[in-house]
């Protein structure tokens, strides 16, 4: 596992890492910032997201490009400047969208989010580079009663097939709705990042190896992150994480943005999306 050491002095100004956050990052593999985005901003981002979801649904209806992996439906859709991988919900013949990756180019408000100093400043320190670029971004829609869970996994083993800087790919998950155990909030295994890439599951289909084998982490270290809309979870690419299905009548939408050093191409596209430079 290659990770950089956090500097002890924060260069991030108002949004840089506080000492306690640096300690949590090293010890736990994540930290949470509450109330980062305000109610009017969230309302706007939710409107943008539902416009994108409608656009994706229209494209799905027009384009019979669905394929299945381990029984679940996916589609690669040419949308705007970039194509996107769309996952559909797991219920048989569901038309509900589960995940869109990447989504940032589908709406100007999401393009602006990539450059937001509230994400970029802490990310510079977590990436360990003076400027950063986007690696990938996805939206998890977790619709009421239908949103399926995410089995325990780390992101790094998946990305290792693509690049050798997996230690410099921190994630920021922005909660667009209040998240709690009833609507399938994000969960992490505290401290699991310290073991590097863990073995995957065996004999469970094509994607089984991408899910972390249960013998290699301790479920009793599980932390359900109940978080009001507008909060952000920063988490390591080595942290074991997942979530339960949404069994409530409330949505649990979240945006996940992953950054890397500036100048490097994105995960799914041969294109560089540098974030706005911070001084
Ligand atoms: O948002 C969630 O519930 C899980 C997200 C996740 O595991 C991921 O995006 O990799």
Image (tube, rainbow, N blue to C red):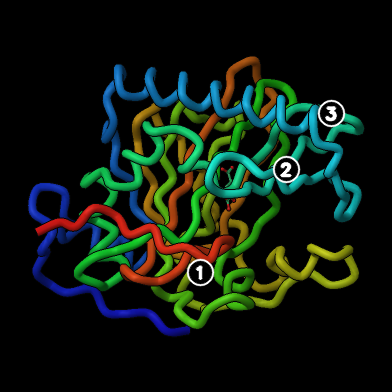
Disc number at residue 94?
Answer: 3
Say left or right for 26 vs 102: left
Is the residue marked by circle 1 packed among few (<14), some (14-19), or many (20+) residues within 10 Å? Answer: many
- Measure the alpha-carbon separation of dots 2 and 1: 23 Å
Query: Which of the 4 image quadrants contains residue 248?
Result: top right
Q: Quadrant of the C terminus?
A: bottom left
Q: Residue at x 23, y 65 (%)?
A: 131
Q: Residue at x 67, y 48 (%)?
A: 85
Pointer 1 residue:
238
For residue 159, above or below residue 63: below
Is the residue marked by circle 3 packed among few (<14), some (14-19), or many (20+) residues within 10 Å? Answer: few
Q: Residue at x 29, y 36 (%)?
A: 34
Nearest-to-viewer mark from 2 and 1: 2
Pick whichever of labels 2 and 3 is earlier in the sequence. 2
Query: Which of the 4 image quadrants contains residue 126?
Result: bottom left
Which type of secondary structure does the marked residue at label 1 adopt? loop
Pointer 2 residue:
87
Cβ(mark 1) to ligand 1 < 8 Å? no
Which type of secondary structure does the marked residue at label 2 adopt? strand
Residue 138 at x, y percent in the picture: 54, 46
Q: Nearer the viewer, residue 77 or 115?
A: 77
Residue 143 at x, y percent in the picture: 66, 25
For residue 191, above or below residue 140: below
Say left or right for 176 vs 34: right
Which type of secondary structure does the marked residue at label 3 adopt? loop
* Circle 2/circle 1 CB separation < 8 Å: no
Nearest-to-viewer mark from 3 and 1: 3
* Circle 3/circle 1 CB separation < 8 Å: no
Is the residue marked by circle 2 packed among few (<14), some (14-19), or many (20+) residues within 10 Å? Answer: many
């Amino acid at each position: 596992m290659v990770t950089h050491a956090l500097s002890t002095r924060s260069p991030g100004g108002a949004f840089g890492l506080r000492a306690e956050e640096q300690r949590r990052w090293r010890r736990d593999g994540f930290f949470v910032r509450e109330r980062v985005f305000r109610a009017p901003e969230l309302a706007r981002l939710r409107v943008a997201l539902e416009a994108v979801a409608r656009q994706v649904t229209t494209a799905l209806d027009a384009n019979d490009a669905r394929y299945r992996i381990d029984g679940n439906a996916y589609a690669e859709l040419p949308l705007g400047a970039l194509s996107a991988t769309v996952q559909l919900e797991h219920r048989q013949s569901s038309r509900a969208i589960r995940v869109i990756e990447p989504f940032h180019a589908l709406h100007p408000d999401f393009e602006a989010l990539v450059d937001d100093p509230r994400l970029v400043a802490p990310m510079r320190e977590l990436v360990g580079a003076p400027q950063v670029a986007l690696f990938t971004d996805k939206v998890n829609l977790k619709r009421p009663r239908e949103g399926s869970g995410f089995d325990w996994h780390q992101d790094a083993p998946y990305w290792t097939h693509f690049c050798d800087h997996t230690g410099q790919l921190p994630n920021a998950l922005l909660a667009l709705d209040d998240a709690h155990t009833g609507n399938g909030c994000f969960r992490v295994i505290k401290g699991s990042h310290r073991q590097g890439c863990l073995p995957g599951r065996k004999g469970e289909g094509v994607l089984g190896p991408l899910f972390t084998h249960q013998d290699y982490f301790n479920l009793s270290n599980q932390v359900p992150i109940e978080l009001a809309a507008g909060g952000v979870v920063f988490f390591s690419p080595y942290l074991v994480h997942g979530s339960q299905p949404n069994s409530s009548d409330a949505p649990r939408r979240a945006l996940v943005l992953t950054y890397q050093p500036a100048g490097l191409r994105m995960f799914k596209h041969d294109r560089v999306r540098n974030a706005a430079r911070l001084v």
